[in-house]
Image (tube, helix red, strand yellow):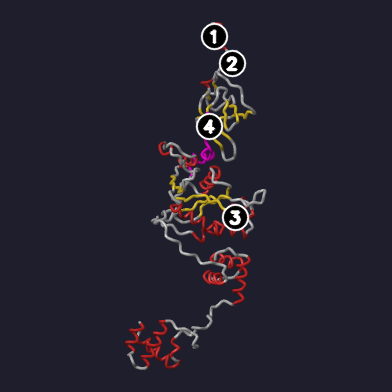
Amino acid sequence: MTDAVKFTSSEQTTREVINAALKKEITNAIAAVKLHLSVREVQRLKAKARRDGIDALVHGLKGKTSNHKIDETVKKKVLSLVTDKYHDFKPTFASEKLGELEGILVNRETLRLWMVEEKLWKPRRHKKRGTYRSWRPRKEYYGEMEQFDGCYHLWLENRYTDSEGIPLELCLLLSVDDATGKITNGYFDTNEGIIPVYRFWKTYILFHGKPLIIYLDKFSTYKINHKAAEDNKELMTQFQRVCIDLGIKLINANSPEAKGRVERTFETLQDRLVKEMRLANIKTPDEANVFLNNIFIPKFNERFSVIPTKEGCVHKTLTQQDTQNIDHIFSIQSKRTINNDFTIQFNNKWYQLQEIQPTTVRAREQVTVEEWLDGTTHFMLRGHDLPYLPLPERPERVKKPPVILTTHKLNWKPPHNHSWIKYARKH
């Protein structure tokens, strides 16, 4: 063994103790105690030292190239691929893609060392400890609680731009099951407004059923944050009304850390999903939604999901009434008053109720205006959808309120030539 090889403290101690035993300065029993070995093992080491020399006590590969060292040509090829194709990939993700797309299997820690050597990766610094937050255990059952949030990001990088070529952000709406860590639904849209949120949860409950709890933040789509809402508990958002109709409990988190599962998932997706869509050359939100739900989410869940504490799914199935009223439930609802001429003004437009209605309609009554996800407008009164005609302009005002009668027999009006009318004229 060459002089350039440096022995560790443990190896040096072993050499000195065995050498002393060989010179009979100490007994085998004392040597065994010092080295935390058995007497028989000390005897074996002494025999090896007599036969091959004292340096033979050190491992035979010390100072030599490992038998498992990867060939230099493979290392150069890997670093070339990382530099050209996976330059912003983290070592773990780059290792996966090299095996999946290039057919080169490299351990992630080996690749990490190579990337650090070539200054392609900078080791992370340990984060400073912030406010202490106690850990909350996961829910026990799948479907017991869904963590939900939206994240604005350049998900398609510079492949999706406006007319001037400026990259556009998309909002990724995401739900993560608390018990399993699975992504249960994902949807790209332009914003986190009520219409995209409606589309998201309508799709979710039609596929999975109704979760018991939705855990989300205090964004204005989900909660009224005005101080008046503290005094008037009846004030609620459109989304809160939907959840009440469906029997879903809402919990508003007081901090991002409280719904950490979905927040950490967004961090992972900003790294992995962005690069996956780059490799797949995804350019539009529609393509992104197809890729997300059909390819990425199944692969992500297979890799990162965990087994729940208790087996079983506690999603509530939709009732027959839920299914029939699904379009009514997921609608933006407002209140409007019927005018004396049976017109209704809504969103600077005028609508004329038709003469024949499924229920008795009186002037000055309030109707519920429902804006459905398909873009249609509906006027609801006592559970009936009132037929109407759109008006091109504002009608003239009518002072005396008439009554629109239905075809019900109790509301039937005889014609002028009816026998009752003739009899009344004679007498």
As shown in the figure, which amino acid type bears the numbered disc 4? Met
x and y, in percent, of residue 377 in the image: 58, 34
Q: Determine whether the residue tagged by mark 4 lies in a helix, strand or loop.
A: strand
Q: Determine whether the residue tagged by mark 3 lies in a helix, strand or loop.
A: helix
If you read the primary sequence from the N terminus, does the residue marked by circle 4 or circle 3 appear first?
A: 3
If you read the primary sequence from the N terminus, does the residue marked by circle 3 or circle 2 appear first?
A: 3
The residue tagged 2 is: 415
Q: Determine whether the residue tagged by mark 2 lies in a helix, strand or loop.
A: loop
User: Which quadrant holds residue 358?
Assistant: top right
x and y, in percent, of residue 23 in the image: 36, 94
The residue tagged 3 is: 291
Crowding near pointer 1: few (<14 within 10 Å), some, many (20+)?
Answer: few
Residue 424 image label:
1
If you read the primary sequence from the N terminus, does the residue marked by circle 2 or circle 4 appear first?
A: 4
The answer for how far apart the CA atoms under marks 1 and 4 are is 39 Å
Which mark's residue is nearer the viewer, 2 or 4? Answer: 4
Q: Determine whether the residue tagged by mark 1 lies in a helix, strand or loop.
A: helix
Q: Is residue 202 above or below residue 33?
A: above
If you read the primary sequence from the N terminus, does the residue marked by circle 1 or circle 4 appear first?
A: 4
x and y, in percent, of residue 178 in the image: 45, 54
